[in-house]
Image (cartoon, grey):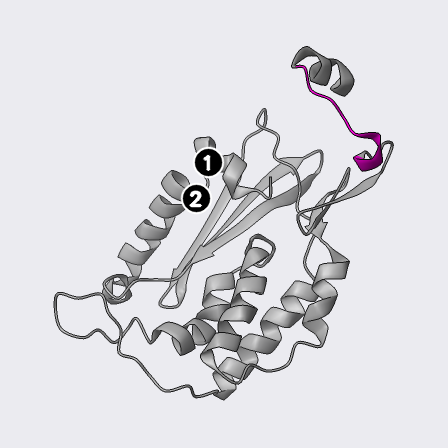
Amino acid sequence: MVFERLRKHGLKLKPQKCHLLRERVGYLGHIVSRDGIETDPEKISKVTDWKRPTNAKEVLQFLGFSGYYRRFIKGYAAIAAPLYRLTTGDPRKKIGKNTQKCKPQPFLWTEECESSFNLLKKKLTTAPVLGYPDFSLPFVLQTDASIDGLGAVLAQTQGKHEHVIAYASRGLNPAETRYPAHKLEFLCLKWAVTEKFRITSMATSLPF
């Protein structure tokens, strides 16, 4: 079927770059198999010996790496919040009434930052295998909101087991940090349904 589809569209393959009859394939830092999608052990192995950041630039480097795999980490935004505050300031402290800017703060590595850093490393090295979405079946969406961010879990019951398709999360902007609890919950639901996991964006919500 693959060869027929390629032939139909006039595409050619270079034998040296083809790997056929593989049960597991590495793709863009992920391992794809019949079991699902998982992180590439070769890439993740770098996390084990990742040294504690000593400045904002090094924090951004770590967040860039861990953020690439955030779909594998439940509540990523809330866990990483202390580290993000080291680079952008605290969104809970606005300057003035009509600005979204946060007060800059000196680089100060706290116990909260240390806990966040170590927990992200642990989550990355023990990341779950995510399932493939089956659009003929219903999805289960779970949401959770707090002052540290919004979180959502997209899952699906396939066979007799519920499989996580992807985790999603994001931080709050300064205005959103002042929302009451019920408004944050509504915001989280709206964001998850209409932005993160809407059907038209599923292709970009998943690794490929």
Q: Residue at x 18, y 75 (%)?
A: 95
Q: In the orientation shown, which residue stands out farthest toward the left?
A: 97
Q: Does the residue at mark 2 contact the one at mark 1 (Cβ under 8 Å)? A: yes
Is 13 one of the magenta-colored residues? yes
For label 2, the crowd category at 10 Å Cα-Cα, with few meaning under 14, some 14 to 19 and many 20 or more, is: some
Give whichever of 35, 50 is nearer the camera. Answer: 50
Q: Residue at x 77, y 18 (%)?
A: 3
What element does badge 2 sit on?
Answer: helix
Q: Quadrant of residue 174?
A: bottom left
Give whichever of 183, 198 is nearer the camera. Answer: 198
Task: Tell me the chief SS of the magenta region.
Answer: loop
- Identify the disc placed on residue 146: none
Residue 49 higher or lower than 27, as above or below: below
For label 1, the crowd category at 10 Å Cα-Cα, with few meaning under 14, some 14 to 19 and many 20 or more, is: few
What element does badge 1 sit on?
Answer: helix
Residue 13 higher or lower than 82, as above or below: above
* Residue under label 1: 201
Q: Is residue 90 left or right of residue 83?
A: left
Q: In the orientation shown, which residue stands out farthest toward the top?
A: 8
* Residue under label 2: 196
Q: Position of residue 201 (x, y in %)?
A: 46, 36
The three-letter code of the residue at mark 2 reads: Lys
Q: CA distance from mark 2 to mark 1?
A: 7 Å
| First to last magenta residue range | 10-17
Residue 7 higher or lower than 199, as above or below: above
